Amino acid sequence: MGVWRVLGIMGLLLATAPFSWAQTCMLTETSQPGACFKIQLDMKLSGEIQIRKDNKIEPLKLEAAAVHEYPERVLSVAQDGLVQKTARIYETAKATITVGGERAERTLRPERRLIVAQFYKDQALVYSPSGPLTREELELTGDQFNSAVVAGVLPGKDISIGETWKVSSSAVQALCNFEGLTEHTLTGKLESVTGDTATFSLSGTAAGIDLGAIAKLKIEATGRFDLKAKRLISLEWKQKDERDQGPVSPAVVVESTVTLRRQPIEQPAALSDVALVSVPQDWEPPAQMTQLDYRDPQNRYSLLYPRSWHITAQVKDQLVMRCMDRGDFVAQAALTPWKKADKGKHMTPEEFKQAMNEMAGWQPENELQASEVPAEGGRWIYRYSASGQLDGVAVVQNCYLVATPEGEQMIVVFTMTPKQVDKLGARDMALVGSLEIPASAK
């Protein structure tokens, strides 16, 4: 009897309740060039890096936290409504990362506070018109949650409470920061409307390619939309990542939460047309703006290098880099400062070739090329190329000796499979040509 009485009361309540479930609202945001927003981003991450060693997986505890605050101005919008280019002035950009108990901090130099974020050849790209970023600065600003495209999660139409929609693939790829999206099930749902605020949820999975490795994400998010201002004003984005080991990145299993607060603002002076005069009007930015800056900790050398090269190891006497081309591993480069010679002198070609042929694990078979390379600034560069076996694997090695008039010497060895020789092309010469020995003045 009690059960029926409860059901009867529920029926009465339903009969007298307003038809809130039939309420609809327009969840769409129209972005226009010139629109400006104040962005606040907080990120917390925890999990582990999985290092494979001797056919075993050794986990390393990973924790990270980041804070970003900046005004952002829309510069260009695509036909589908997704923002394609913005300019930001970072007021705060910092992150702390702890791996296996070792803590590191990352910040953005004051002279690099102006950042352009855009899509180029379907890939996210950030750079500073003021000069090259370091790899750490690139990761700090380029790997952050993309505030420019958050409105892409909206359905762009009238939605009833309880109704769902599938988020566009372009928005998912941008927000997951994938090089390529393979599949996704991310779906939105209008949960409630209170006054001028609509609350919606997002849930689903996404899989894609990141730095040549497969990444699988599970996403749960909650957002708020201001119906009066017609703007997305906040988003809490939670995701679980499982990323395989790639050519330039380890396997990771992590959980992260990003909290975004977004407020429309008047155009600040720091993002006026005059302040942004250094921002390229062309869609393809000049190469010097997208190159990265590396400086040896001991100031023995420095270099500006394309982003296709990734630093994978850095020890006292050697820097190891790997070249990636849209997810494809092309070649590895090892940069090693060599013992200094007397002023005006350097190793002879015969001494250099002998030193290269005696590298551990290397069995040269055929000499492919050996000659001096034209160089500027009084430097002397010698190139020795050979095919052979490295630890039992067939490879080609291009070895360079770079010497300065003061006697400084440096060796750079590029290693690749025979099939990747053509793909490497002249990238080895470009990297060698960018070396400054000793390091250039800051």
Image (spheres, rainbow, N blue to C red):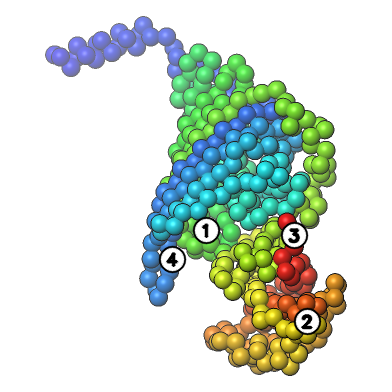
In contact (CB < 8 Å): disc 4 and disc 1:
no
Instruction: Name the amino acid, label 3.
Output: Ala
| Rendering coords of residue 9 (x, y %) | 25, 10
Tell me the residue that label 4 is attached to: 51
Judge depth for marks 2 and 1 and give the one in front: 2
Q: Earlier in the sequence, mark 3 or mark 4?
A: 4
Instruction: Name the amino acid, label 4.
Output: Ile
In contact (CB < 8 Å): disc 3 and disc 4:
no
- The image quadrant that residue 28 belongs to is top right
Q: Is residue 121 above or below residue 25?
A: below
Q: How many neighbours does mark 1 have within 10 angstroms: few (below 14), some (14-19), or many (20 or more)?
A: some
Tell me the residue that label 3 is attached to: 441
Q: How many neighbours does mark 4 have within 10 angstroms: few (below 14), some (14-19), or many (20 or more)?
A: some
Name, please, the residue furthest toward the top: 16
Tell me the residue that label 1 is attached to: 214
> In percent of the image, x 41 and y 52: which residue is there?
47
> In percent of the image, x 56 and y 49: which residue is there?
106
Real-space Cα separation, disc 1 to disc 3, in angstroms = 40 Å
Tell me the residue that label 2 is attached to: 343
Judge depth for marks 3 and 4 and give the one in front: 3
In contact (CB < 8 Å): disc 1 and disc 3:
no
Real-space Cα separation, disc 3 to disc 2, in angstroms = 21 Å
Left/right placement of residue 405 relative to residue 43 reads right
> In percent of the image, x 48 and y 24: which residue is there?
199
Question: In what element is the residue under mark 4?
Answer: strand
Q: Is residue 428 above or below residue 346?
A: above
Real-space Cα separation, disc 4 to disc 1, in angstroms = 16 Å
Real-space Cα separation, disc 3 to disc 4, in angstroms = 37 Å
Question: In what element is the residue under mark 3?
Answer: loop
Name, please, the residue furthest toward the left: 1
